[in-house]
Image (tube, helix red, strand yellow):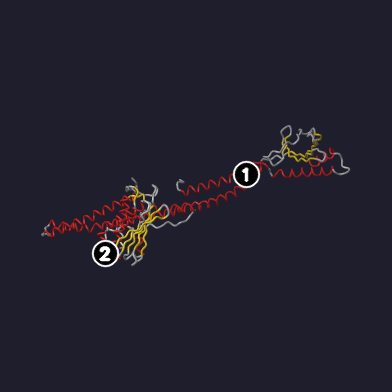
Amino acid sequence: MFTSLRSRLWLSYAFLIVTALSVVTIVLFVSLFRSPWMYRQTLERMQAVQSVLVERMGEPQAPALPALAERVSQTFDLRVLVFSADRTLTFDSSSGSSADLPFPARRNNLRATPILRDENGAAWLYSMQRLPDGTFLVVAAPRPRFSIVNIFSDEFLPVILLGGGIALLLSLIVAFLFSGWIADPLQAVVSAAREMPSAEAKPVRVSGPFEVQELTRAFNSMAARMQASQKSQREFVANVSHEMKTPLTSIQGFAQALLDDTANTEEARQQAAQVIYNESGRMHRMVLDLLDLAKLDAGTADLKMAPVNMGALLRAVAEKFMPQSQRAGVRIEVIAPDELPTLIADGDRIAQVFTNLVDNALKFTPDGGTISLSARVRGATDMVIHVKDSGLGIPEGEQARIFQRFYQADLARGGGERHGAGLGLAIVHEIVAAHGGRISVQSRAGQGTAMEVILPLNPSSTTTKAHKK
């Protein structure tokens, strides 16, 4: 019982409401105890008599104070006392018939009603006023005897019970609505979480308090990322299967030709062996690329950080592609100032980045085109490297996807011919990210493509994803 959040919230609200009503009742009881309204009539009568006495004493032919006080005491059934300036009793209208009353001491702050006790402990209500001659006039009356508890139970308790009951009922209804306002969105999040992982799961409606809304938004964002990840995994498996299928089919077909002696000439056997070798090499490269991506994703790729001369590295990459670029009729140029500072990075991985970028640019740059590699320092912390080609460019709608795995935009750039498995730019993106950098593309169809790589000159351990040796 009371295990759900909604029931516990409701119980908490109910406890707070009952506590508040109890505190109000106790405060009312204490207030009555300190200043009961039943004493007011007696106090007002004493104060009126005191005012009459003071007024009569100021008249020219007024009787003496004792005679006047005696008359007033008998008429109004009150006790009149006079104390000298040194607080000594000089007159008591009830002298001999009642226990002596002391001079009123300092008022008790716990009581709003002035109470004085005689030598026998009996309680008297009193009103005191200092006269012009320095004496003190005190008018007293026995405190009316009644039970606070009886007055409270007879007069106030029924009203409190009725009003408190109505307030409690309304408060519990409001508390129930408030607990639902908080708990219902959380229950919706729980129900949606139980449906995960599901491609058909819908976002939870955002409602409730601010904190619950933030939780719901965070859950919706997480669910969206999970669904995107699942979709990416499904596409990844489908793409890997598709990319593996073609070489495996070729390998299987030509191996079968060798086995059943269909390739019965030396030339046919040589061709079959060459196809098997090429396709197995293609699969081998794909597997290595996938392993690289897996390590970079998991942050377990070993980055051997050391000073790197970026100008020399870019020139080495350009020289590596010189025979291929000459056959394609494409010119490769390097623009890197001699005073370029060294970069702290994994030289082999950075070389892999620009090898893939130049290889990709070379595939889509026509005869007579140019590929440019340039490097410069921006500010005091970053190095910016551009790889530009004068090829056909990338349509704007495809630029955001070119770093996805197995995605190839070459159908628009290369007349429908496929080049590789579409993993090169994905690996480039992960290596740059592992160094704490970023890569972006600027391109227009028919006007070439520019890849911009920004790398920190000295990446800290907090900015790299992979482990460094």
Q: Earlier in the sequence, mark 1 or mark 2?
A: 1
Location of residue 173 with respect to 89 vertically, above or below: below
Q: Secondary structure at mark 1?
A: helix
Residue type (three-letter) at the residue carrying disc 2: Gly
Residue 248 at x, y percent in the picture: 21, 57
Q: Would you identify the image quadrant in which residue 76 lies? A: top right
- Disc nearest the viewer among 1 and 2: 2
Find the residue positioned furthest to the front: 338
- Left or right? Give the position of 30 relative to 290: right
At label 1, counting other C-alpha atoms closer than 10 Å, the crowd grade (few under 14, some 14-19, many 20 or more) is: few
Query: Mark 2: few, some, or many residues within 10 Å (few <14, many ≥20)?
Result: some
Quadrant housing the N terminus = top left
Q: Position of residue 260 (x, y in %)?
A: 12, 57
Could you tell me which residue is drawn at 84 percent across and 39 percent down? 65
In this view, the residue in front, 253 or 461, is 461
Residue 409, given in percent of the width and then of the height, sits at 31, 63
Type of amino acid under label 1: Val
The answer to whether 189 appears left or right of 247 in the picture is: right
From the image, tell me which residue sits under label 1.
27
Task: Please tell me whether residue 450 is drawn above or below residue 119 in the rendered image.
Answer: below
Picture disc at residue 122:
none
Query: Eyeballing the image, is 418 above or below 436?
Result: below
Q: Is residue 218 above or below residue 122?
A: below
